[in-house]
C-alpha cells in the first residue's frame, strides 16, 4: 500500500500522490463541478476554456501550474457567462486575503473578517 511521506496516510493502491497538493485546488475543482451542475456551462465549454489556458505560451511545460491554469479558465468562463466579472473576482480575492490576515490562527476565514468589508459590501452584499 502506498503512503505519503508527509502524513503517513494510506492512498489507494497505485496512487503515489494525492490529486490536490493544496486545499484551494480541491476547492477550485469543486466550484467548477458545482457551477457545471448548476447549468452555468457545459463540459464541452469547460474543456475548451481549460484547454486554451494550458496551451498558453506562458504555461509551465512540466504542468506545475495546472491548477493556476484551471483557476484562470474558471475565472474567464465566469466572465464570459456574465456570472462574475474580473473586477468582481479581484475584489473578492482581495477581501479574502484581508480577511485571512485578520483572522486568528485556527479560526475559519470569513469575508466578514475583512477589515474593509464595508467597501466590498457596497458592491456585493455578503
Image (cartoon, helix red, strand yellow):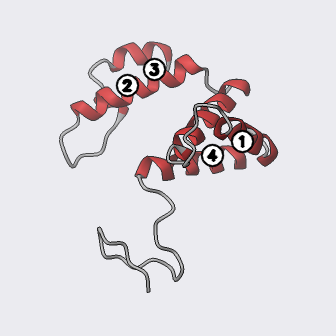
Q: Residue at x 47, y 73 (%)?
A: 16
**Label 2 near label 3: C-beta < 8 Å?**
yes
Tell me if residue 48 comes above or below residue 120 in the rendering: below
Which residue is drawn at the image coordinates 69% and 32% (left, top)? 77
| In this rendering, the label closer to the viewer, 1 or 4 | 1
In depth, the one of 1 and 114 nearer the eye is 1
Residue 119's spot in the image, x, y percent?
38, 13
Q: Which residue is mark 2?
A: 95
**Residue holding disc 1:** 51
Q: Secondary structure at mark 2?
A: helix
Q: Quadrant of the N terminus?
A: bottom left
Of labels 3 and 4, earlier in sequence is 4
Calculate the distance from the C-alpha at mark 3 to the C-alpha at mark 2: 6 Å
Judge left or right: residue 122 versus residue 73: left
Check residue 32 in the rendering and tell me which mark sits there, or answer none: 4
Task: Kindly check if marks 1 and 4 are in contact, taking CB atoms under 8 A apart as contact.
Answer: no
Snapshot quadrant of residue 102: top left
Residue 102, numbered label: none
What residue did someone put label 3 on?
A: 91
* Secondary structure of residue under mark 3: helix
- For the residues labelled 1 and 3, the Cα–Cα distance comes to 26 Å
| Cα distance between the residues tagged 2 and 4 | 21 Å
Q: Earlier in the sequence, mark 1 or mark 3?
A: 1
Q: Position of residue 43 (x, y in %)?
A: 77, 48
The image position of residue 120, as x and y in percent, is: 42, 18
Amino acid at each position: 500500500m502506498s503512503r505519503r511521506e508527509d502524513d503517513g496516510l494510506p492512498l489507494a493502491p497505485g496512487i503515489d500522490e494525492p490529486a490536490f497538493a493544496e486545499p484551494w485546488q480541491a476547492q477550485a475543482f469543486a466550484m467548477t463541478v458545482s457551477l457545471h451542475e448548476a447549468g452555468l456551462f457545459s463540459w464541452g465549454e469547460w474543456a475548451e476554456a481549460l484547454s486554451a489556458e494550458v496551451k498558453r505560451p506562458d504555461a509551465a511545460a512540466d504542468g506545475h501550474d495546472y491548477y493556476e491554469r484551471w483557476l484562470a479558465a474558471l475565472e474567464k468562463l465566469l466572465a464570459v457567462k456574465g456570472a462574475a466579472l474580473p473586477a468582481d473576482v479581484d475584489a473578492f480575492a482581495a477581501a479574502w486575503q484581508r480577511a485571512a490576515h485578520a483572522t486568528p490562527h485556527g479560526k475559519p476565514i470569513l469575508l466578514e473578517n475583512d477589515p474593509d468589508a464595508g467597501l466590498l459590501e457596497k458592491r456585493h452584499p455578503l
